Every structure is written in C-alpha cells, then in structure tokens.
Amino acid sequence: MDPNILFKYALQVRDRSYSPYSGFRVGAALKVAGVEEPVTGTNVENASYGATICAERAAVLAAIARYGKVPFEAIAVVADAQPYVVPCAACLGVLAEFCPADFPIYCCNLEGIQKVLQLRDLLPNPFRLERP
C-alpha cells in the first residue's frame, strides 16, 4: 500500500479525536495484511488521564477486534507537530507485542510523511515474553 494512503486515512481520522484536555489531536492508520482499507484510530482523552488511549493503540485494538491476531504491515501517525510525531512508549510496547522489529512507522505532520522509522529505531530492546 502506498504510504501516502495511510497518511490520508490518519489525517482524516485525526478530525474525530476527542482531546478536550490537551488539544493535541492525533490520527493513526494501520495496514493489516490482506486487508485493502487501513484500520484507523484516534486519541480519546479522559478526565482520568490514565484512561486516555492514543491513536496508535486505538488502531491496533480495533484491528484485533475486527480481524484477530493478523500481521500488521505498517502504521502512519499524524499530528500537528514539528517536525513530526512519533508513538509514545506505551504505544511502542503494544506495537512490539504484535509487530516485528522492522515494522515501518510513518511519522507525519499535517503536511505529510516526514520520516520513516522502524520499530527497532524507537524501541531497540522491547520487553517480550519468549514464546515457544
């Protein structure tokens, strides 16, 4: 899938962000293997800050709810940030649970994709339970 399509989906869903406390609206679009349309997510804040969910985790959880544990191919994350936005540590931990180290993360601002990183670039030593 063209990464610019992921960007466009992430930019669109960003408009549905519920962020009355921070005003920081974020959108994410996750490419699921074998699925044509990306799964999107946006940040949803809560007065109890610990209950807030980021756009990236919203997309991952929606994809799992819809398709089960299937391979993810890439994610785009967009916010009004300079030079671009990257996933937070909690989101990186969730991505590490389901994605390989070379998983591409398209870091975007409102103008488009600014940088492509791999999961290992942002989380070089993830906590993982060894599974047989």
Image (cartoon, rainbow, N blue to C red):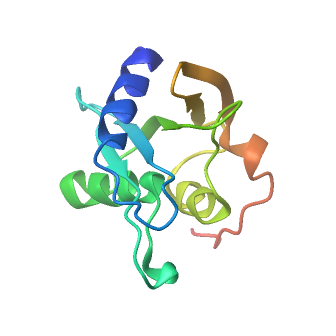
- Residue 68: quadrant of the picture: bottom left
Quadrant in the picture for the C terminus: bottom right
The location of residue 23, given as percent across then percent down, is: 48, 55
The location of residue 78, given as percent across then percent down, is: 50, 36
* Horizontal side of residue 41 vs 127, given as left or right: left
The location of residue 102, given as percent across then percent down, is: 65, 36
Q: Is residue 53 above or below residue 122?
A: below
Between 40 and 80, the one nearer to me in the picture: 80
Kindly identify the residue that appears in the image at 59 percent across and 45 percent down: 100
Between 4 and 27, the one nearer to me in the picture: 27
The furthest residue to the bottom: 48
Q: Is residue 7 above or below residue 55?
A: above
* Horizontal side of residue 111 vs 121, given as left or right: left
Kindly identify the residue that appears in the image at 41 percent across and 60 percent down: 19
* Horizontal side of residue 22 vs 55, given as left or right: right
Between 42 and 70, the one nearer to me in the picture: 42
Quadrant in the picture for the N terminus: top left
Q: Is residue 47 above or below residue 114?
A: below
Kindly identify the residue that appears in the image at 41 percent across and 57 percent down: 43
- Residue 89: quadrant of the picture: bottom right
